[in-house]
């Protein structure tokens, strides 16, 4: 949240509670910004035009001290426990399962290490292999007209005009792998008869020129 929002609200004449509510923070945070602005030379009687870039910079420097390595004290505390966090993240594949970030946060708190969840999640992801995904290898889509991909999707519910009952609508989606040209066949079921009907309609729509079809996994 920008320091201008804190100080600007204060210059409007409202109290710290209102300033905090407008900025979406607690009252203590709002007070720290306002005090820093006063130390930088801003007075309550000033207009918003007095809120210069120099004052904003001074407020930020006072409230958010420089971080030489780009991280704060919470990150530094986690660095001291990095080896243990890696063990918790990986598990041993036998008796000890990999732990969630919520559980790791709880275990750290028990040992006296209180850190924000978001910081812990980012630390575990960047340094401890949490949910690290394998590299995705792109597959060549092939020649035009060579493949048609298909999948079922749910479209929600509609009310049947004849019975008045709500019915789930399914969509059988056909997508040409090369051009991404798409045809959608709606039905009330996923039966073999519904799939065949969808295939026949798609075959007519694409003029039957695609050589193969495959489900989307």
Image (spheres, helix red, strand yellow):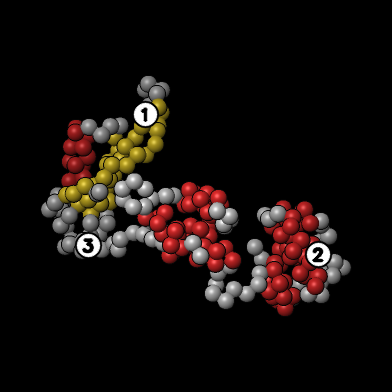
Residue position marked by numbered label 3 in the rendering: 139
> Is 153 placed left or right of 56 in the picture?
left
Please, which residue is most extreme toward the left here? 211
Residue 5, how many percent across, how many down? 71, 63
Q: How many angstroms separate mark 3 from mark 2 (CA)?
A: 59 Å
Residue 38, how many percent across, how many down? 81, 70
Q: Which mark is residue 11?
A: 2
Q: Nearer the viewer, residue 138 or 154?
A: 138
Q: Earlier in the sequence, mark 3 or mark 1?
A: 3
Q: Is residue 9 visible?
A: no
Q: Secondary structure at mark 3?
A: loop
Q: Which residue does the image show at 37% across and 39% down from the upper left?
A: 155
Q: Which mark is residue 167?
A: 1
Q: Which residue does the image show at 81% across and 64% down from the upper left?
A: 11
Residue 15, how many percent across, how many down? 81, 56
Q: Which residue does the image show at 21% across and 37% down from the upper left?
A: 195
């Amino acid at each position: 949240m920008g320091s201008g929002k804190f100080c600007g609200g204060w210059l409007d004449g409202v109290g710290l509670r209102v300033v905090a509510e407008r900025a979406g923070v607690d009252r203590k945070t709002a007070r720290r910004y306002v005090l820093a602005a006063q130390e930088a030379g801003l007075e309550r009687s000033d207009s918003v035009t007095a809120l210069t870039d120099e004052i904003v910079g001074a407020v930020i420097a006072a409230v958010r001290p420089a971080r030489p390595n780009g991280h704060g004290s919470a990150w530094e505390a986690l660095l001291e426990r990095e080896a243990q966090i890696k063990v918790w993240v990986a598990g041993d594949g036998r008796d000890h399962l990999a732990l969630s970030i919520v559980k790791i946060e709880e275990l750290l708190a028990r040992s006296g290490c209180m850190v924000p969840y978001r910081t812990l999640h980012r630390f575990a992801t960047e340094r401890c292999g949490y949910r690290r995904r394998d590299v995705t290898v792109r597959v060549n889509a092939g020649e035009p007209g060579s493949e048609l991909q298909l999948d079922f999707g749910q479209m929600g519910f509609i009310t049947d005009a004849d019975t008045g009952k709500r019915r789930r609508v399914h969509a059988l989606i056909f997508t040409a792998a090369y051009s991404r040209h798409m045809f959608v066949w709606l039905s009330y079921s996923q039966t073999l008869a519904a799939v065949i009907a969808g295939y026949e309609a798609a075959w007519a729509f694409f003029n039957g020129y695609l050589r193969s079809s495959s489900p989307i996994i």
